[in-house]
Amino acid sequence: MNARTWIEIVEDNVGRYGELVAGIDPSLADMPRFFERDDAGGWVDRFVNFILDAVEGRVGFVKFQSAYFEACGLAGLAALASGMNRARAAGMGVILDAKRGDIGATAAAYARAYLTPASEGGSGDFEADCLTVNPLMGPDTLEPFIECANRFGKGLFVLCRTSNPGASWLQDKMAGNRLISDRVADLIGSFATADLRSLSPIGAVVGATVPNEGRRLRQLLPNSIILAPGLGAQGGDIGSIHSLRGSHPGDLLVPVSRGLTRVEDRDIPAELYRHMIIERIGSFKAAIAYDYTDSQIKSA
């Protein structure tokens, strides 16, 4: 298991493997048929282990989208727990994309479920290194997650300006004299350390599909890690990704899910599917690669 803090994981793994986050979203319609057998939900576990076999040693982070696992019932939850534990044991940074958020007591239960080690009272079944959370109900609903993150060396990604087409309906509206996304960024930034030379474990979700908004929000979040979904299937491009960068290596993580694992031909054999995933990993890593040192020299 990871004995490192979230920030240590980010700094170490970005240095070794880059910023790509492999998303694991089990959906039968998007995967090869060879995963299907006559054993009900066993395909979920086979898919998770197949993907982990392919990405281990090639990427430093995996993101499990909890909804896909929950939709598969108990078999899905068992596959989620075993997959998360396997990835953490291998040294990968594990992000659980659950977007939780609720009133104090309920938020505390979520924090215990996903961020608290078994040795400290958590179940250990779904312990992640980092969790996505929803701030819509207000700052008080984030407090249990912040407390757990700080106490146990975990990370959070707070939804700030998301990549979906309908995000502007709320996130781009004015509240007082500020955009709602700016107010959320201010809140996220308030949890950061005063030392701008170090990364904060409380980060933000900012979509790669909104580069103009992303540039503005990055200015408000100079030492926060941004999780930038939307590259590939949702229309984000490499230029958009780079607009979200700050000045710290590790301050941007780029998740790709369907872009890595989805197939058009569901009859593809296992070995070709594995080769396809590995090729896609290489292509995405090369596309998003960035030299912070060279950038700092040019801006000096």
Image (tube, rainbow, N blue to C red):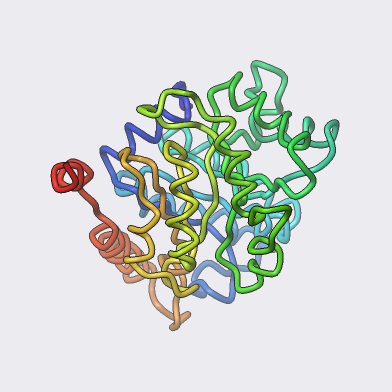
Residue 129 in the image: above or below residue 57: above
Count of numbered badges drawn on the protein? 0
**For the point 24% across and 52% down, which residue is it?**
290
Percent of width and height locating residue 258: 48, 68
Asked if residue 79 can be seen in this view, the reply is no
Instruction: Tell me the quadrant of the picture where the C terminus can be found.
Output: top left
Q: Which of 18/136 is in front? A: 136
Residue projecting furthest to the front:
177
Percent of width and height locating residue 15: 27, 38
Percent of width and height locating residue 157: 57, 43
Is residue 161 rendered to the left or right of residue 90? right
Residue projecting furthest to the top:
119
Q: Which of 279/106 is in front? A: 106
Q: Determine which quarter of the picture holds residue 96.
A: top right
Q: Which of 147/54 is in front? A: 147
Residue 37 in the image: above or below residue 103: below
Residue 138 in the image: above or below residue 283: above
**For the point 60% across and 69% down, which residue is it?**
164
Is residue 279 rendered to the left or right of residue 101? left
Percent of width and height locating residue 249: 30, 39
Asked if residue 186 can be seen in this view, the reply is yes
**For the point 47% across and 47% down, which residue is it?**
226
**For the point 32% across and 66% down, which residue is it?**
239
